Image (cartoon, rainbow, N blue to C red):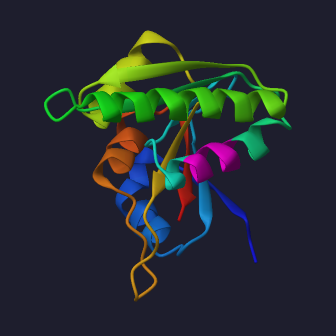
């Protein structure tokens, strides 16, 4: 089985490429825009769940070969936030930092208020990252895998930032 599929992305032919990516199934995808610079830092955006731990672990396995520093980001919606949610998020970030450190990687952590999409956009604007890491749900029964609206928008709006989609 294939662990990672790497594909070039040209925003000019984005609709056809996005459809091809949806049909890629459950493979993890590293999508590199034509204008992408060589990444020097990664933004790992993950939810404080068991699935989020898988996203962090996969990203760390790739990044340990490249020795990139990372920002580990999770967001908690301030409208539905509870003290328990905040503590779970802090524990997740702390554990993620330890996991990355075990691989010899340095990481800063960020607990953001609000919606994940907005938190990711804010962090990308604040600090240049050459790679964004996101988790994605598994493929549908027909083999198509949702990319998600945020991932699709990211590819079209951030031509210098590669995207790693970790599939469930």
Q: Is residue 68 magenta?
A: no
User: Relative to 105, is 96 on the left or the right?
Assistant: left
Q: Residue at x 82, y 36 (%)?
A: 64
Q: Nearer the viewer, residue 160 or 111?
A: 111
Please report the residue visible at 52 percent of the width from the left and 31 percent of the height from the top: 91
Residue 89 lies, with reference to residue 163, above or below; the image says above
- Above/below status of 119 relative to 152: above
Quarter where residue 62 is shown: top right
Image coordinates of residue 66 in percent, x first then y, are 82, 32
Q: Which of these two is toward me, 64 or 131?
A: 64
53 sits to left or right of 154:
right
Q: Position of residue 134 (x, y in %)?
A: 49, 46
Q: Is residue 112 above or below residue 162?
A: above
Let me know if residue 92 appears in the view: yes
Observer-nearest of 9 and 76: 76
Q: Position of residue 52 (x, y in %)?
A: 51, 48
Q: Residue at x 35, y 28 (%)?
A: 86
Can I make out residue 160 in this image?
A: no
Q: Where does residue 28 sit, x and y in percent of width and height?
A: 61, 61
Taking the spot 33% from the left edge, 35% from the top edge, the residue there is 85
Residue numbers of the magenta segment: 53-59
């Amino acid at each position: 089985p294939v662990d990672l599929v790497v594909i070039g992305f040209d925003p000019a032919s984005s609709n056809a490429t996005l459809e091809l990516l949806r049909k890629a199934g459950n493979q993890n995808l590293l999508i590199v825009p034509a204008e992408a610079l060589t990444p020097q830092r990664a933004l790992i955006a993950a939810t404080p769940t068991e699935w989020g731990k898988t996203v962090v672990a996969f990203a760390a396995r790739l990044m340990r070969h490249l020795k990139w520093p990372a920002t580990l980001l999770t967001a908690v919606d301030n409208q539905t936030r509870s003290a328990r949610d905040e503590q779970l998020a802090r524990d997740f970030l702390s554990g993620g930092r330890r996991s990355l450190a075990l691989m010899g990687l340095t990481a800063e952590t960020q607990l953001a208020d609000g919606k994940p999409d907005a938190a990711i956009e804010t962090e990308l604007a604040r600090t240049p990252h050459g790679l964004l890491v996101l988790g994605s749900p598994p493929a549908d029964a027909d083999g198509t895998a949702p990319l998600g609206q945020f991932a699709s928008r990211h590819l079209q709006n951030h031509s210098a930032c590669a995207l790693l989609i970790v599939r469930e």
